[in-house]
Image (tube, grey):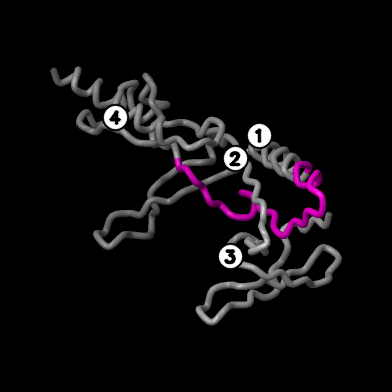
């Protein structure tokens, strides 16, 4: 099994329609290889994804990103949107726990692939290569203390009484990394019920 870590794509070949059809990549020893298939170059550092007609297997590991003080959203002091409002600015930081988790997930998926006879890894990438969140959560934490939270336990803003959060912003963490859609819907229904009770 040849393991290519963050294999640099030297050249991407396209078909008549302009779609990526093959990738020339460089392995760790400096040699170049060409792989045909439906290639989809990705934006992370030197990596690429290749799906061949002969059959491929993709492994994706997802984990929890714990809240931390260095990950937050604020308003950009310089950039404005077309209406003149300040644009939102996202600050993200992978902490020690997240980096350990990334290593564990990478080691585990490599071990799984190593058990496949003739397996050939053509891509390996992680959140260290590109920030590409699948489910953006948080920034409006629920809590009883306005100094440490944005919304109360019913999802109502501490500062603005007629502002209610019924989305993923009140979710503090992704948990296991699974899709949060059902949790968001359940929270929205709960928030609606609490709001109706307040207005009754």
Q: Which mark is residue 40?
A: 3
Q: Residue furthest right?
A: 29
Label 1: few (<14), some (14–19) or many (≥20) C-alpha neighbours in 10 Å: few
Residue drawn at (59%, 62%) of the image? 42
Q: Position of residue 182 (x, y in %)?
A: 40, 32
Question: Mark 4 sits on what residue?
Answer: 157
Query: Mark 1 vs mark 2: which is more N-terminal?
Result: 2
Q: Position of residue 154 (x, y in %)?
A: 30, 22
Query: Mark 2 vs mark 4: which is more N-terminal?
Result: 2
Q: Is residue 160 visible?
A: yes
Question: Mark 1 sits on what residue?
Answer: 97
Does residue 45 lie above or below 200 as drawn?
below
Query: Mark 3 vs mark 4: which is more N-terminal?
Result: 3
Query: Mark 2 vs mark 3: which is more N-terminal?
Result: 3
Q: Is residue 34 left or right of residue 134?
A: right
Q: Is residue 153 left or right of residue 20?
A: left
Does residue 106 lie above or below 69 as drawn?
below
**Closest to the observer: 57 or 185?**
57
Q: Is residue 181 left or right of residue 129?
A: left
Question: Mark 2 sits on what residue?
Answer: 62
Of tags 2 and 4, the one toward the viewer is 2
Q: Secondary structure at mark 2?
A: loop
The picture quadrant where one finds residue 55 is bottom right
What is the span of residues highlighted in magenta in the rendered image? Answer: 111-136
- Distance between the Cα atoms at labels 4 and 1? 30 Å
Contact (Cβ within 8 Å) of mark 2 with mark 3:
no
């Amino acid at each position: 099994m040849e393991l290519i870590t963050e294999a640099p794509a030297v050249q991407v070949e396209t078909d008549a329609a302009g779609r990526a059809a093959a990738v020339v990549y460089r392995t760790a020893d400096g040699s170049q290889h060409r792989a045909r298939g439906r290639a989809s170059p990705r934006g992370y550092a030197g990596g690429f994804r290749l799906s061949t007609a002969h059959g491929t297997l993709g492994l994706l590991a997802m984990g929890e990103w714990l809240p931390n003080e260095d990950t937050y959203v604020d308003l950009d002091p310089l950039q404005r949107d077309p209406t003149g409002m300040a644009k939102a600015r996202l600050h993200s930081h992978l902490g020690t726990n997240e980096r350990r988790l990334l290593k564990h997930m990478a080691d585990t998926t490599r071990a799984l692939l190593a058990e496949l006879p003739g397996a050939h890894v053509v891509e390996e990438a992680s959140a260290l290569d590109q920030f590409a969140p699948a489910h953006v959560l948080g920034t409006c934490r629920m809590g009883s203390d306005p100094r440490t939270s944005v919304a109360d336990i019913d999802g109502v803003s501490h500062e603005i009484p007629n502002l209610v959060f019924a989305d993923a912003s009140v979710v503090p963490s992704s948990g296991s990394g699974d899709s949060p859609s059902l949790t968001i819907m359940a929270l929205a229904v709960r928030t609606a019920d609490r709001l109706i009770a307040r207005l009754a």
